[in-house]
Image: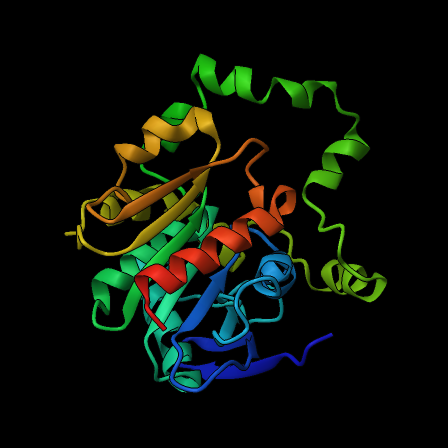
Amino acid sequence: MVAKQFFNGCHGKMSYVKIEGKKDFPTIIFMDGFGGASNYLGLKNIAKRIDTRYPKLFIDRLGVCESDETDVERTWENIVFEIHELIEHVEHSPIIFFAHSANGPLALAYQHAYSEEVLGIIGIEPTTKDGDFLFQTKAYKVAISWMDKLSPEERNQIFIDSEWTENEKLEEERTAKHITEGSTLFNEYLMGQKNLQSISQLPKNKNLPVLIFLQPFRENEYRCSEYAGNNTTYILLEGHHYLHRVHPDKIAKEVTRWLNYNVGY
């Protein structure tokens, strides 16, 4: 198990994991989807496959894993400020976001607030403003129909990294936080739609390098989304919302290729 560290920010203590890379290379900021127990455990299977020259930082937002709970309102501005505080404490080099699901909008918001720091964004099915509508469509229901054939045990396996050690499985169980009423994550959930709509309306850098991994039935959603721009690349993969569990080698290969082409280190 890698060493977890802690940072005392203005709104509370946050846990994080830092993996060193080559000096002067931009740092990749990993943030797993909403409700994950640990960003490191959630995304380590991809991170360990990506070019080791890039430093890697896994951030647990307030309310996640061993980070503090907080009463500070869960606006996107407050969350982005908290993430920026930690990054400034740990890193001073340019950064690249690697965000899954609900953390995609936060990567966009961070890029808006601190545009000079962000070289690009990588997303695995990042949440879009039109995502809720998509889940009501026939295309979505057809695409996930295979899940109806799975047993509850088989469904649970989708969300588990098969490469976790026994100690990591125990760590995931120990640090997982339930989204109970009044908790930080519950309050963030309540603010989710408002934050999402606000972020989607922020001015975008249309030339920002963006790499999106998505399931084929969501292609039109992303090509019309807030992630679309002059320098956005789309990689279509069959699977499910946790594509990094299904295609870790393929995703890591595409990420490394994209980094070398767009970042140029």
Question: Residue 264: horizontal and vertical position, in percent?
Answer: 32, 69
Question: Residue 32: horizontal and vertical position, in percent?
Answer: 53, 56
**Nearer to us in this view, 185 or 149:** 149
In percent of the image, x 79 and y 59: which residue is there? 169
Total labels drawn: 0
Q: Examine the image and state in which quarter residue 217 appears.
A: top left
Relative horizontal placement of residue 167, taking residue 228 as reference (left or right)? right
Q: Examine the image and state in which quarter residue 108 appears.
A: bottom left
In percent of the image, x 44 and y 19: which residue is there? 136
**Nearer to us in this view, 122 or 85:** 122
Compared with residue 23, is residue 225 higher up or lower down, i.e. above or below? Answer: above
Question: Residue 50: horizontal and vertical position, in percent?
Answer: 54, 63
In percent of the image, x 33 and y 35: which residue is there? 222
**Nearer to us in this view, 137 or 182:** 137
The answer to whether residue 75 is visible is no
Relative horizontal placement of residue 121, taking residue 257 as reference (left or right)? left
Question: Residue 4: horizontal and vertical position, in percent?
Answer: 63, 79
Question: Which quadrant is the C terminus positioned in?
Answer: bottom left
Q: Residue furthest right?
A: 166
In percent of the image, x 46 and y 12: which residue is there? 138
Question: Which quadrant is the N terminus positioned in?
Answer: bottom right
Relative horizontal placement of residue 255, taking residue 5 as reference (left or right)? left
Compared with residue 85, is residue 112 higher up or lower down, i.e. above or below? Answer: above
